[in-house]
Image (cartoon, rainbow, N blue to C red):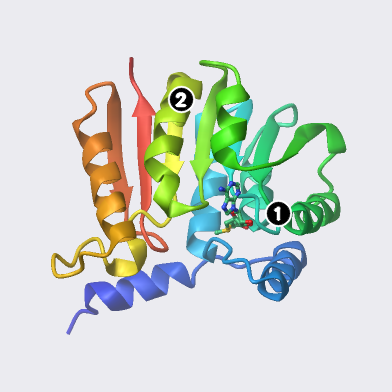
Amino acid sequence: MRADKQTSWSYTEALPTEDEVLLRARERSYELGVSAVSSGVGAALTVLAAASKAATVVEVGTGAGVSGVCLLRGLGRNAVLTTIDSDVDHLRAAREAYAEAGIPGNRTRTISGRAAEVLPRLTDAAYDMVFIDADKASFPLYVDQAVRLLKRGGLLVVNDALDHGKVADPAVREATTNTLRKVGKAIRENENLASAMLPTGDGLLLAVKTA
Ligand SMILES: C[S@@+](CC[C@H](N)C(=O)[O-])C[C@H]1O[C@@H](n2cnc3c(N)ncnc32)[C@H](O)[C@@H]1O
């Protein structure tokens, strides 16, 4: 008998092998109470960063740097990650992870502040990739800002887009779940975006800005 989808899903999530740098960043995430991307999402971020050949990336929700290290490992040598977090302790831990990963300091721009205040200060159509992983209630605002920030051909990546399996269950009417349903629908219906949902982690929503 063939394995069911849940078994295949767990199997693929367990495939990536993480090195000491990522394992230490995960440990710091745990100590700080930060929920880092899953190893499957981390591997997908590295592949997406490499495939997109992005030179300029914005991340909303630095955490302790797990996703940042995964992104930076896929990006080219001259690419710069601009990453935003409202918690200075998280940013400090992330800088430690970047240093341990051997990332030169000039390849990361860590910005302390609330994303809703920082994103509007970033330049229009100047970024190749935007990764959103903080404060789900504000995802609609972050997605609007991301579409403004992306160049044509740029890639939007939204983490936790299936809200721990709740988006797919019509009986769940929680505010955050409803917000994520609306965000998914708005992205699917935006004729300037080509989108796809990867069932990786808790759902990785991808969209390319086509016009
Ligand atoms: C899910 S964690 C990010 C994990 C990180 N992407 C990783 O995989 O390593 C969310 C982060 O967003 C930050 N955060 C929460 N609300 C925020 C806001 N309004 N603006 C900026 N950062 C925020 C938290 O401090 C936390 O570090």
Which quarter of the rendered picture does the C terminus lie within? Answer: top left
Give whichever of discs 2 and 1 has the lower sequence position: 1
Task: Check disc 2 and report its element: helix, strand or loop.
Answer: strand
| Residue 162 appears in the rendering | no
Q: Quadrant of the N terminus?
A: bottom left
Residue at the location (73% across, 57% down)?
Answer: 90
Q: Is residue 138 above or below residue 77?
A: below
The residue identified by callout 2 is 154
What amino acid type is highlighted by mark number 2?
A: Gly
C-alpha distance separating marks 2 and 1: 28 Å
Q: Is residue 75 above or below residue 173?
A: above
208 vs 181, left or right, is: right
Secondary element type, mark 1: loop
Which residue is at the front of the view, 82 or 10? 82
Q: Could you say where residue 157 lies in the image, as x and y percent from the top left?
A: 44, 42
Label disc, if present, on residue 87 of the rendered structure: 1
Q: In which quadrant of the rendered view does residue 29 lie? A: bottom right
Q: Tell me if residue 171 comes above or below residue 157 in the rendering.
A: below
Q: Quadrant of ligand 1?
A: bottom right
Crowd tier of the residue under label 2, counting other residues whose Cα lies within 10 Å: few below 14, some 14–19, many 20 or above: many
Residue in the picture at 37% in, 29% down: 208
Vertical comparison of 138 with 189: above or below: below
Mark 1: few/some/many CA within 10 Å (<14, 14-19, 20+): some
Residue 195, horizontal then vertical, whole percent? 29, 36
